[in-house]
Amino acid sequence: MKARRLLRRKRVAIPAAMAAAGLFAWYVLPWCVPLPAGLTDAPASPVLLDRGGRPLHHLVLPDYTRSSPVTLEEIPADLIACTIAAEDKRFHDHGGIDLLATARSAKDAVVHGRAVSGASTITQQLIKLTSPPAKRDLRTKVREALLARHLEMKWSKEQILTAYLNRLPYGNHRTGPAEAVRFYFQKPLSDLSLAESALLAGLPQAPSRLNPVRHPQRALVRRGMVLDRLAKNYDASRISAARAEPVALRPLTTRDLAPWLPSFENGQPSPRSLTTIDAGIQGDVESIVGEELAKLSGSHIKHAAVVVLDNRTREILALVSSGNWRDPNGGQINGALTLRSPGSALKPFTWLLSFDKGGLHPAAIVADIPTRFRTKEGLDAPENYDRTFRGPVSVREALACSLNVPAMRALNDLGGPRPLNDLLSGMGVLSVGPDASPYGLGLTLGSAPVRLLDLTNAYATLAEEGRHLPWKLWMEKQHDPVSHPMSPASCYLIADILSDPIARAPAFGRGGPLELPFRCAAKTGTSSDFRDNWCVGFTRDFTVGVWAGNFDNSPMKGVSGVAGAGPIFHRAMLRLHRNHAPQWLERPEGLVEVSIDPLTGKRTNAPGPATLVPADRMPLFASAADRDASGHVLLDSSYSEWFSSSHNRKRNAYALDKGMPAESPLRILAPRDGMTYQLDPELPNGGTLHLATNLPGQADWSCDTLEVSAGGAEAMVKLKPGNHILIATDKRNGGKQNVTIKVEQR
């Protein structure tokens, strides 16, 4: 009797224990296994957008796939239904593990001696997709089953389905339905048909084997299987129509606007980075470059780069890096960021300094004569592009006609290459480095390499009349503080010259690519060995910089900046102003119009075209002493060699007076810029410094921080500790020169 009672208790206890164990395994044990970290964040491929939000590039994730997660509401009901039919028909009825499917799979494995069919639910597949790779054994399957139960108790079915769909691999490196539809059909996700939904739903089973691009028949068979499974719960007429619908793929091509953008120097983009690029302008400029390079193929020009800037914001509206990104010979080099010789494109900045620091103005006369400059290698005797010398010329002609010798003489008068390099550095052109002396006076002719993007931005500073900002590519980036390296008046005068087609005509002719149907400044540059070709210019609102040449450094066939880069510049400017009314710069205060004798550069009361000059730097009036009895303008002895040479074609306008002193520009000889002085309390003069210029008695000295006193033909200054700026003003024309010194107490 007692034994029977024990047996009955055992028969009751075993099922109870098994039930308790089952409940423990189903509801408690899953909580002991932590969910994969990858569940909480569906990776999204970074997308680079143009300024209006249009996608330019869908970048890849570290695994080289592209993914664009979407909400469940954005996914068509047909695609959801097809996916559930294909992968887990009892998804809404089980708790993460389909016990019926598991039992069937186990029975089949016993009968066949191997795994015949899987029993993984959508929840289990999601666990697998978000877990680190692991060996496919019983231990892994048990772990995934426990995690699936954990997830089902924590998340809703809608959450699970959303995470699953956004992580499904659809082949061709596309993850999630949004990227799959974009690649295979190039249409919005909401426009999918039932047939297209069934096709996509079948792909994750074997994305490579069922790739519809390479194996359309396999994909079609799989689509039919998905529709068969769906037919039990769907309208028969819709299923029938879906079966009859042909597969109409539109595989996405890989041609992107601005192909250089993903590898640009500004670092990694955020998930949705808004660039400053205007897709419309970018596409049109790319087409222009391609068309113009095709025309220049006979001149051995393979590559070209273009930068388009908004002058006010310095935002890059368009950038072409090479002209043909797919060219295996340098096509993926970014010409906008490559150091190249700018040729004469730097000359405007030398004349800008001459206006701001050297007391010159556009009508001032400068010498285009044979000149020898002493360098470390010996004497240098530069020539102009056409190997002629024009004698006395105005600054307007010297710049507009891009004369080499007057530019080098002007830089020499300013003290050498250092002032020009300091100015360029202040405008963001930093490639010359801190020491410009190795480049000598040739710096103004382009002896030092620069980047197109930096030089174009320096020209934009001219267009903004001295208001300098760094260039900008990302909308999220904050600007550095604004600087003003040069005066608005001097910048405007340079812009006025560069936009004057009449002044340019003696060297470049009329009607070429530098002339547009609206006012536009333009300057070309060509390296001495024809390896680089430039054209940079601006209107009030836009600046365009163009470089053309070959990245392998092979020379072009005698093509100048006008013929090479010029046509690209011309067409880009026309495109920018197609729907944007062209405007010119507003004249700043401090400039006045005066009548100038074009042969002497001096003021006159005679009627004639007016010239802009700074109000505080008025030219001297012309006088009878300027001409001989026959009315010829007298030239000093520095013109002797030129006057008697075959270069002189102005004998009817000039005469040589060898006794006439040369009219040199004012230069400070002492102290030297950047000098440091130490005060010795035992000095008898108490620390007095003598000031000297090349024109004794012709300078007025001043200093805001030191006491200046007269001292014969020159002046003296009483030193005290600190940093001081000494200014010498030319009595003849008001031009100013300055030096900075430092005084320390010993």
Image: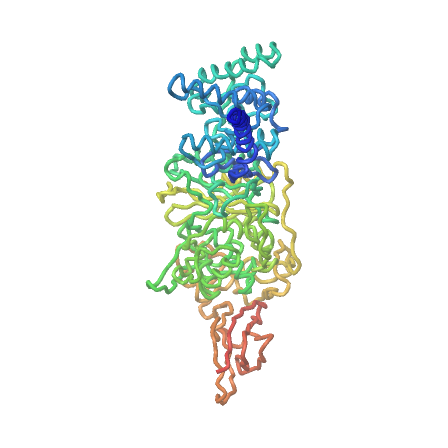
Judge whether 112 appears above or below 744 on screen: above
Looking at the rendering, which quadrant does residue 234 occupy? top right
Q: Nearer the viewer, residue 170 or 249?
A: 170
- The residue depicted at 60 percent of the width and 42 percent of the height is 518
Can residue 165 be seen in this snapshot? no
Q: Nearer the viewer, residue 223 or 695?
A: 223
Measured from the top left, where is residue 392 in percent x and y?
48, 59
Q: Residue furthest front?
A: 1
- The residue depicted at 61 percent of the width and 62 percent of the height is 603
Can residue 288 be seen in this snapshot? yes
Measured from the top left, where is residue 249 in percent x and y?
50, 20
| 540 with respect to 354 (left or right) | right
| 719 with respect to 435 (left or right) | right
Measured from the top left, where is residue 248 in percent x and y?
52, 17
Q: Nearer the viewer, residue 411 or 458?
A: 458
Judge whether 64 appears above or below 395 on screen: above
Judge whether 385 appears above or below 83 on screen: below
How many numbered discs? 0
